[in-house]
Amino acid sequence: MRFEVTILGSSSATPIYNRNPTSQVLNINERLYLIDCGEGTQQQMLRFDIKASRIDHIFISHLHGDHYLGLVGLLSSLHLNGRKKPLALYGPAPLMEIIDLQLKYSETVLQYQIQFTATDASKVETILINDDVTVETIPLDHRIPCTGFLFREKKRLRKLIKEELERLNVSVAYYTAIKKGADYTAPDGTVYPNEQLSVDSNAPRTYCYCSDTMPTPSYFDQIKNADLLYHEATFLNAMLDRAIETHHTTALQAGEVALNNQAKKLLIGHFSARYKVLDELLDEAMSVFPNTELAIEGKTFLI
Amino acid sequence: MRFEVTILGSSSATPIYNRNPTSQVLNINERLYLIDCGEGTQQQMLRFDIKASRIDHIFISHLHGDHYLGLVGLLSSLHLNGRKKPLALYGPAPLMEIIDLQLKYSETVLQYQIQFTATDASKVETILINDDVTVETIPLDHRIPCTGFLFREKKRLRKLIKEELERLNVSVAYYTAIKKGADYTAPDGTVYPNEQLSVDSNAPRTYCYCSDTMPTPSYFDQIKNADLLYHEATFLNAMLDRAIETHHTTALQAGEVALNNQAKKLLIGHFSARYKVLDELLDEAMSVFPNTELAIEGKTFLI
C-alpha cells in the first residue's frame, strides 16, 4: 500500500528563498491528505502536479498564519473548479469562524459541504478512521493551541503461507478467513491453528507530524517507534534561547527527540528565514540521529 | 518623477499556469503603493525583488479572495521583519474585521499601526493626498461592493524659461515663486507677467485601476483621458454571457472602454483560468484599441 509524504512548504513564519510556508500532502493508498496549508499551497500543488481535487481530508495544526493562510484560497478554488463531494476539515475550533467570515463577505456559498472536526490541543483524540488509516491528534507545546497528527496505517491482514495451504489442499474460499486469523478445520475434522497457515504482516506503519512545538516529553510516548517522524527544527542549537522563547525546537533537539523515541527516520522542516542554506541544520540533527533528511519542497518520502 | 506600475499577479479567481491572483505595485516618486494582494503576493515580491518594507499604502478593491487573501500573510511578515512605521490600508469596511479575527486567534499584536480607511463603493471619494499623488476611489459594478482606484500625479510646478530669466537678470531667489505662477517685478518697477517667464508643465499623469467590473458607463467620466488605464478583461467576447452573469468585462469591451474614454494606453488583466495562452485576449482588445498590452507578471509599465 502506498504511504508517502510530499513536501509543499518548509519555511517558518514567512516565505523566503523560494521556500513556502508549511504544507505537506500524504498519499495513503491513493487517497490524498493535506497537512497544514500555508499561503501559496495551491500554487505549490500546481508546481508539483498534485491534484487538489483528490484531497478529501485537510488537517490544520494551529492558527499561526504560516500554517493555514492558504486554506480559504484552496477551498474557494475547489468550489470554482466544481467540487461537489464533501471535504473533511480538522483544526482548532476558530478555524471555521475565520472561514465563514471570509465566505460571508465574498458572498460565496460553497457547492460542497465542509465536514469540520474541531481539534482539542489538551488531549489525544482519534479524529479519523477509514479503511486505510487512523489519525490521532498529538497535543504539542506551542505558544497557541497546536496539535500534530499521527497517521497509523490500518492493521494489515496476515500473510498466507502458500506452500502449507497447498500441501493441505485448503480451498481458496477459506483464504480470507485465514488472513483475518481464523483456524482451519479440514473435512476430516482436523483443526490446523492459524499460526501454521499464516504469519503476521508487518507492523502498521506510522507517520508522525510534529509542528510547531518545544520538545516537551508530554508527547514522546505517543510518537515512539514512528516509521517516519516529521519534526520541526526551526533553529540551530546556537539559537536555543530564541527557540525556547518562541516555543520551537532546534535541529539538535529534533535529533534527540528522534533518537530517544526510536524513530526509524527523521524529517526536519519549518526552517527559520535566517538560514539561506540548510546544511548546518541537517548536520546538527544528523550528529545525534544520522537517519535524518531535510523536508525539501517537492521531494517525496516513502514511509 | 517616476510613475510606473509593476504587475505581480494577473489571474482571476484561481492561480494557474504560473499566473498569480491580482496584485500590482505602483512606484510614484520612489514610494511604493500596493494595489490588491491576492494569495502569493509576498512570494511574487520576493521573485521580482520588490521590497515589501517600502510599501506604505495598500489598496484593496473588494473582498473576493483573489484580491486580498495574501494580505494577512504580508501584514504578518512585515511585523516579523520588524516594521515599526504605520501602514495605511484602504478597502471595504469588513476587511479590518477579517484581519482582526485572524490576528486575534494567532495571538499576534502587530508592532506597527494599521491606519485603516474604509472605502464606500457607492460614491467617488478622495482617500489619499500627499506630496506626490492624490488617490480617488472609482465605484465599479461588480457582484459585491468594489472600487477601482485613480492615481493622479500632483500638479507639477511651471517650467522656467531660463533664457528669458537670464536676459532679464532675474535673481535665482525668485525662481520658486515664478515656478508657482507669480509675476516678477524688476528693481525698476517693471512687472513681467508669469507667462513670459515660465510655461505650464505637462498635465498631471493618471493611472486608473479598474478591477473587477462590468463596463458600466457610471465610471466612464471619471477615467477619461487616463495616461494608463488598467482594465480587467476576464473573458473573450465569445463568453459575453458569462461575463455579464459574473459581472466581468470581455477583452473587446475593455478595448471599447479605452477607446470611448480616450485612454492613452490600455493594460488588460484578470485573465480567466480557461485561457492558457493570452494572445487572443490581446488581439481582441487591440482590434478596438491598438495601444493595448497584457498585464504580464514581473513587467513594469511606465505611466
Image (spheres, coloured by chain):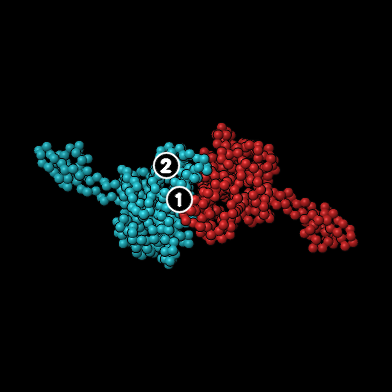
Chain colours: A cyan, B red
The percent position of residue B232, horizontal first and vertical second, equals 59, 41
Where disc 2 sits, the SS reads strand
Q: Is residue B153 visible?
A: yes
Binning the other alpha carbons within 10 Å of mark 2 as few (below 14), some (14 to 19) or many (20 upward) gives some
**Chain of the residue on which disc 2 is drawn:** A
Between the residue at mark 2 and the residue at mark 1, the CA separation in whole angstroms equals: 16 Å
**Chain of the residue on which disc 1 is drawn:** A
Amino acid at the residue labelled 1: Tyr
Binning the other alpha carbons within 10 Å of mark 1 as few (below 14), some (14 to 19) or many (20 upward) gives many
Is residue B208 shown above or below A241? Answer: above
For residue B23, the mark is none
Amino acid at the residue labelled 2: Ile
Taking the image as shown, residue A206 lies to the left or right of residue B110, namely left
The percent position of residue B207, horizontal first and vertical second, equals 65, 47
Q: Is residue A8 visible?
A: no
> Which residue appears at 42% of the width and 39% of the height?
A113
Specify the quadrant that holds the N terminus of chain B. bottom right
Where disc 1 sits, the SS reads loop
> Which residue appears at 57% of the width and 44% of the height?
B62
For residue A68, the mark is 1
Taking the image as shown, residue A184 lies to the left or right of residue B113, namely left
> Which one is nearer the viewer's eye here, B18 or B270?
B270
Marks 2/1 same chain:
yes
- Give the mark, 2 or 1, whose residue is nearer the N terminus: 1
Q: Which residue is mark 2?
A: A114
> Which residue appears at 12% of the width and 39% of the height?
A186
The percent position of residue B214, horizontal first and vertical second, equals 60, 37
The percent position of residue A280, horizontal first and vertical second, equals 42, 63
